[in-house]
Image: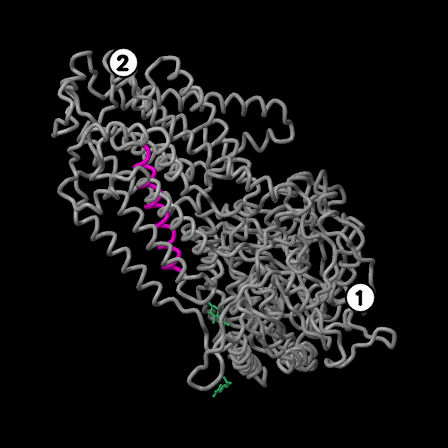
Amino acid sequence: MERTKWAAISGLVAGTVLLCRSIPTTFAFDKPVHTSIVVLASCAGIIIGLSRLLPREGGGRAHNGQQYDAVPLGDLGQPHGSREPSPSPGDVRYPSSLRKLRILFLILVLAICIRVEVLREVLANIQCATASWEPIIPLLLATWDYIAVQRHRKRFESDDDNPEGSVYDWLESSWTKARYRYVVATALLAYGAIDGLASASNPKSTFICAAALPYRWVVPMVQWLGTGLDFMILYCIGQLLHQQEGRGQRGLVLRFLSVGWAFLFSAVITLIAGLVYYVLAEQDRKWITTTSSLYLWSTLRLDGLLCFNIVCTVICIYHVGVMTTSTIATFVAASTITTAQAWSNPHPFPPLPAGMAFIALCLAIFGFATYLHIESTDDKSANTTSPTFTKVPSWLYLCLLILFFVRAGLWASHGNTVTYHPIDMLIYDAQSRHEAYINQTSASKTLAKAAQAYELRYQRNPPPGFQHWFAYATARNSVVIDDYDNIYRDLLPFYALTPEEIRLRTWQMIANPWNDAAGISIRDGQVAISPNVMPTHRWMLDGLVDMIGHFAEFLPDMDLAFNLNDECRVAVPYEEAEKMRQIGMTPMQIERPKNGFSEARNEQWQPIPEQAIAETPLRELSWQHTFYDFGSVDCPPSSPARTQRTWNVGELCTSCTHPQSLGAFLANWTLAGNICHQPDLANLHGIYLSPAAFKGAHALYPIFSQSKVHGFNDILYPSAWNYIDKAKYAPSPEHPDPPWAEKNSSLFWRGATSEGVSPGAGQWRGMTRQRFLHLANNINSSTAPQPILLPTPQKTSEGHNTLAYTTFPLFTLTKLLPTDIHIVDFIARCGGPDCPNQATEFHPLAPPSDFQAHWNYKYLLDLDGAGFSGRFLPFLLSRSLPFKAALFREWWDDRVTPWQHFVPLDIRGQGFWGTLVYFAGFKGAVGGGREVLLEAHEVEGERIAERGRHWAGQVLRREDMEVYFFRLLLEWGRLTDDGRDGIEFAVE
Ligand SMILES: *[C@@H]1O[C@H](CO)[C@@H](O)[C@H](O)[C@H]1NC(C)=O
Ligand SMILES: *[C@@H]1O[C@H](CO)[C@@H](O)[C@H](O)[C@H]1NC(C)=O
């Protein structure tokens, strides 16, 4: 067994490091009880299996065979190593009677079972969790050791007046002999680890910990209970492994077996409890029995790692005792987590107290080294387990020293201040991006130039009828002539389908009304709505007919399928979609092109049957999670969105925000819409959490949608909602749009909880609208403090002040910066307890107000709903400044430049207050009573508002929608034409 000691300790260290790295992104916590049962059962199996490999000790062999200890110590009457539990009946440290053992065994089983339930409780509302107190466990064990052992120890020691430590000087000897020495060392470690973890933790997320629900205080209490249970579990395992009863007859094997059986019993009891729950809770049955392959693989991996770690822990406990084992594990875990965090966050945002974290780590290192030192010099005659080291080797000190220097380096390189405000730079940068955009899209002044630019951009010639489009666009003074990359991207994969397939799939979509797709048919230049369309959304189809009618005479005969739902529909898996896009990108060379569509296209489109067909290619996922089934399927297989689960919704995922952020602010709107590096979005938007209507396909079905999130293959078109002005910018004498300076300088939003459905499982807590409401209204007064970038007293070389992030409690911010963000009327789209919970949480609800009342406010918040926000275009047209947080993208996404025409916000809301403070200014006291003033950036705010208004009046007019749609449908005409590879527009 001695050989296994070092293997087990190294295994424990390596396993703990690996666990700390893999736990934050595992899927296994989606079903914590399932996972726990699997882990417990497999650990039990391994431990029971391994114990069969152990030497079976008979009575005498145990005494002679177990040579733990090279140094026979003191009591010669004891033939086995004295680090074995002392068999003297007076030793109270370890259980000696079978009865006590049974009680311990039962307590262990019970504690494990309750621990599983505690884990489930905490994970279900992890956003309410506080910092972990687990590092306190070694201290608890040391305290227990002090109470139960060291006092007895004193008696032994006073008998023995020739202490082994006589070679050390008096001071050290008195310290290492002090009875409270372990308590002091573990207390240092616990303090350092807890403090270090707290300073290294990510900022809290905006996921709602509802004040209306009891979890605010239940979860922290349950966390404490969990720490207590962990202590109990470790204690019981330690006792069972060192039981005196097992000496002689029962032997080593039985001791390990008893731990294995305890795991197995707990697994069985948990399983039975789960089965009972399954029978009782009808509504959860489906959830309990369905798993995904992602979950299975992730659980399998975690299971392997956990079992390895648990087995190493058990062997370690056997060799070096439970206190030393937990000390090693705590130190390794704390230094891994804090170092990784310091490594990946060298920037001023998130504002981590790097100095504090470094000091905490020093304390932890000091506590750990002290612990090992006193343990190695411990009085061996009275110790119960072998010490980790007889003398702490110098390589270990070297390792700790290296850790110290690495962290010192990280601390030194951590930047706390920035020399300029990121928003200044973003606005400056946006200006040149916008100019470059205009430059490259309005270069072509003649038809020939435009056709040439088309070919250069898209590696094929324009579709037939391009001359009509060009005439149409120039007649309406369209600024955008060349850049239709949006259309190109949307249509690219369709080149992998034959025209006939596209036509058939269109028919399949519109022939069954269940699909929620409406047909529009174009015949001989006339637009008509197909039969079989449900009367809802009539306005939308009428708007479409109106819009297409302007240019239908130039379009070939065809049928189109329009998405009647707000949610997008078609997500082709990456592996397939990438191949299709490659096919689409192959340049086409046509020998003798024909400038016109094929004849008799009319007959190629199957008529829509009066009697609806029953088959559907779609799968319904309304009111369910859609992220892994649809949302992320178009991401590369190795991307975080497909391999990681950020189950800790209580923390801001900084690796998800980094690529598109500059500090706390959103810098890259395009990248922010790409979900592939943002696995945390699975819990942060209604479309992924629980969409109201979701009928999606994984095969490339052609459907035209008003908006879509990343990864969907819907074809975007200008929404009829905006075209027919369902939400209109129309100030009146009663509701004027006053100049900027006369506006009320607060942030305004009115809306409904219509982003997704919350049927009772608390889905609303993650939805964007609800989160922003919560964040802005400081409903839950303990919502985490928010980072604001404010000037510091230090000057830069150019003489202006540097800036640093300071966090403020929300009540300070809401007092300084008024916001008016409320739900109108009633809570929509909810069920079960989620209706009253939201009503309480978001109380008071606002009365309905006139849409034109928006223009009274300087800042208008714009948030996604079930799909895109129909208000954004009117907001842009107004003199107010829109703040937009959205995942849905529309047809105009390329033409509007964030920070030039509107203010983008991250969907997580971490920069919400910081951005508002930039524009509205800040005056208040920071820590230490220092008065800080950040001037309001009124000029910048007004300028963006005016530029947006001006630009929207140029490129987002009704005419621009027609021009976009015209070009899109010409392309679609070519794609659905049998002569697709032989027709094109060619300059004569
Ligand atoms: C616009 O394009 C021209 C040539 O096409 C180039 O010389 C000029 O620098 C561009 N301007 C901007 C602002 O990109
Ligand atoms: C955003 O990121 C993309 C991809 O990395 C890049 O091509 C683009 O230039 C970036 N845009 C801005 C505004 O930084």
Q: Main secondary structure of the magenta part?
A: helix
10 Å neighbourhood of mark 2: few (<14), some, or many (≥20)? some
The residues colored magenta run 322-344
Amino acid type assigned to the residue bearing label 1 in the image? Phe
Q: Which residue is mark 2?
A: 250
Amino acid type assigned to the residue bearing label 2 in the image? Arg
Left or right: 189 in relation to 428 = left
Q: Which residue is mark 1?
A: 851
How was the colour assigned to the protein in this rendering?
A: one colour
**Secondary structure beneath label 2:** helix
Pointer 1 residue Cβ closer than 8 Å to ligand 2: no
Q: Quadrant of the N terminus?
A: top left
Q: Position of residue 629 (x, y in %)?
A: 54, 45
Disc nearest the viewer among 2 and 1: 2
Q: Residue at x 37, y 48 (%)?
A: 334
Q: Residue at x 38, y 36 (%)?
A: 143
Q: Nearer the viewer, residue 803 or 77?
A: 77
Q: Is residue 983 visible?
A: no
Q: Is residue 148 magenta?
A: no
Q: Is residue 332 magenta?
A: yes
**Secondary structure beneath label 1:** helix
Of the two numbered discs 2 and 1 on the same chain, state the one appearing first in sequence.
2
Q: Residue at x 21, y 48 (%)?
A: 396
Q: Nearer the viewer, residue 277 or 81?
A: 81
Q: Nearer the viewer, residue 841 or 217?
A: 217
Q: Position of residue 948 (x, y in %)?
A: 66, 77
